[in-house]
Image (cartoon, grey):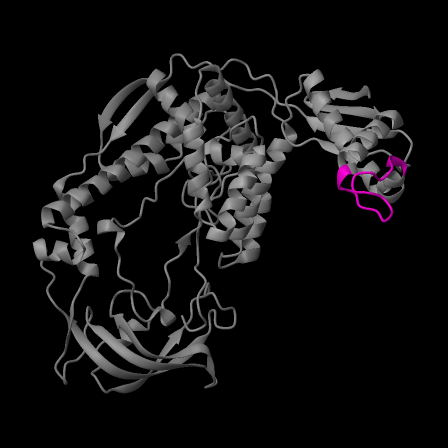
Amino acid sequence: MQTVETLNEGLKRAYTLKITAKDIDSKVDAEVKRVAPTIRMPGFRPGKVPANLIRKMHGEALAQDALNNSIQEGVQKLIADHKLRPAMQPSVSLEGEYAPGGDAEIKVELEVLPDVPTPSIEGIKLERLTVQADDAAVQAQLEQIASGQKSWNDAPAKHKAATGDNVTMDFVGKTADGVAFEGGTGTDMAVEIGSGRLIPGFEDQLVGVKAGDELTINVTFPEDYGSKDLAGKPATFDLKITKVQTAGESKIDDDFAKQLGLQSLEQLTGLLKGQIEQQLNGLTRTHMKRKLLDQLAAGHDFPVPPSMVDAEFQQIWHQLQHEAEHEADVEAAKAELEAERDEYRAIAERRVRLGLLLSEIGNANGVEVSANEMNQLIAQAAQQYSPQERDRFIQYVRQEPMAAAQLRAPLFEDKVVDFLFDKAEITDREVTKEELEAAIESEEGFDTGTHHHDHDNHKPKGKKAAKPKAEKAEKAEKPAKAKKVEAADIEPAAPGDELVQAEPVKKAATKKAPAAKAEKAADEKPAKKAPAKKKAAE
């Protein structure tokens, strides 16, 4: 095989490989010998078919396999001989038409990883903001759980429903011209007045109803409603009230804890305190990690492979475009994104650089993910597949370095971050939860000083720090700040979801490792709140 370098510019490399007909033919001969014992042909005993007949019968397929194997071996040899570190999968193409029996000329194009300067990890100073899980926080969570575990008692026949009561009804939704719309009809739907579960204006008109009442209410669907046929339009609902109930007292005691599957109120309180502490520790780590990444980014600047930046940018852009689709004014949201495209590309470049830095730090200091830890990661990821598909997924990950790197990257990165925490000079300061959350949200607290970005709520220069129309892309790991702490993660499902004006659900950002040898930085993009998919009558 002959190799000629045709491009060496920055991080870009290109080569021409010439695979001779002799090399290909020798592989065909080897393949003929390998398959000969399995070939069956009338007139010949098994395994005795002449090689020339095997070539005549299967020569074209054998030659193609030999060429493919030669290309694969050639690319691997090229990478090894030139000590290349590909940033992404090399591009391999056949130059011209390949004629069986002739030479093959192959073009290989790739970008290599840069020589990352030895990262400076000395002198890192960090402040650790801590919050105590006090009794008031635990009590607030107990009361929150109790409010979700209400018992309902049938109200007297003439009782008029008030805020906090539970009303059960049959309903028929109609458009302004009196036509019932799809998904707008249901029976035995129950809702607590004042819960905010239904579309705006619906629950308010239930105040004062009694069991047996029949009435028609008028509503207007929100502009950002999931069904475009109903969004922003008026409608009526014909209601038949079948039941009105009042809330019973929820006493927080041992019996209450037992209803949740626990042994005592003490056990429930301990569980809640542990969960709150875990949340607060997560917020503390998020703040420290962002500060750490800011220092690394500010102290290191080197070229990164454009292909890796392109891949990272496309991941960010795809998420932002998806979020823009759920804005009230989709076109305006997309126009704003386009105006800020360069800012998001700078974020992608920053992420790639941080990923390479963390990888270099980890490799230089013996940070590694053990085989046992990797097995646990694979097993955990396989749980999202059906039992029939799990073995196939596990086999795929073990055979594909890129897939394995994608699973490995978050844990590897966490280990590198923990290593750097151990090296850093850390001072502690106790704050309130509100102060910690404000510090995480603050632009000033996370500006790099060079790129004008923060990790949680990136904004282009000149924009206000208020929440933007489309949530921005750069973020360190962020625990779900608004998540309710439920005992044993038990939260009873609310009945009658057909008319629910659902809370927006957070979309989780998926992470992709840009290359097998460079772990991705974990300043993930934030989960954008997007309207949940609803039925037509919601």
Residue 91: x and y in percent read 73, 33
Q: Quadrant of the C terminus?
A: bottom left
Residue 353: x and y in percent read 54, 26
Residue 216 or residue 38, whichever sits in front? 38
Left or right: 41 in relation to 393: right
* Magenta: main secondary structure: loop
- Quarter occupied by residue 104: top right
Q: Is residue 523 above or below residue 392?
A: above
Q: Bounds of the magenta span?
A: 37-52
**At x 49% / y 37%, what residue is drawn?**
462
Q: Is residue 381 above or below residue 447?
A: below
- Quarter occupied by residue 346: top right
Q: Is residue 450 above or below residue 283?
A: above
Residue 410: x and y in percent read 45, 33
Note whether residue 398 is visible. yes
Residue 180 or residue 484, whichever sits in front? 484
Residue 38 or residue 208, whichever sits in front? 38
Left or right: 165 in relation to 184: left
**At x 20% / y 55%, what residue is drawn?**
145
